Image: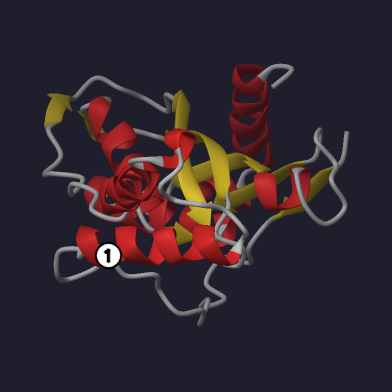
Amino acid sequence: MTHAVVTPIIGSGDASPESAVPVSPIDMGRVADLIGQLLVELGEDPTREGLIGTPERVAAWWSDLLSPTGSAAATCFAESHLSNQLVVVGGMSVWSVCEHHLLPMNLAVAAGYVPDGEVVGLSKFGRIARAHAGRLQVQERFTRQIAEELTGVIKSEDIAVAVRGTHLCMSMRGVRMEEARTTTVHAGGRFGSDPVLSQQFLTIAAAQWGAR
């Protein structure tokens, strides 16, 4: 199995352009028409039995993917007796689309933080992951965006995010390595300076991925 591990340098200032959510509704009729034209250019007949309705279905999928709901306001709960407890939320699996090849990628997400006086509602983590996956993406940027939003929610730099991706642009094209996986890690605050805490997080994250 091939693994590519990318650990961004904290505070390096990634200057890559953001992949913004569309500000206006997608013209599904226009997209369906373009898909129909693509089928024709690929030597297919969009009116044959198996392809009837395909352009509309593809257009609906693109509209759904690129019209994500926001991650909503976080619900926080006071917990004044917590002391140096590591919280890791894993098992979050989202689909996005690689902006370089327009092929899907599956992203397994684990996020960790150290509560200080309050805890964040667990569903917030999944909503953040889904919101940032719902656009044309690259995994490295996706990882950073989750970490940045969580930093704002928790109001602390003590955030760790690990993402393990399966990219069809590597599995079914190019080198065609079906077992290839890419891992990206953001380690902020104490996760960047405390090797024990960092290792605890990575161990838990890897255990949740299992043999995936």
Apparent side of residue 118 relative to residue 116 in the rendered image (left or right): left
Quick one: SS at disc 1? loop
Residue at 57%, 53% in the rendered image: 44
On the question of residue 16 being in view, the answer is yes
Q: Amino acid at mark 1?
A: Val
**Nearer to the camera, 189 or 80:** 189
Residue at 13%, 27% in the rendered image: 78
Residue at 30%, 22% in the rendered image: 82
Residue 48 x/y as whole percent: 46, 42
Q: How is the image coloured?
A: secondary structure
80 in relation to 168, above or below: above
Apparent side of residue 74 relative to residue 194 in the rendered image (left or right): left
Residue at 44%, 66% in the rendered image: 37
**Nearer to the camera, 28 or 21:** 28
**Nearer to the camera, 80 or 2:** 2
8 in relation to 177, above or below: below
Residue 2 x/y as whole percent: 87, 41
Q: In which quadrant is the N terminus drawn?
A: top right
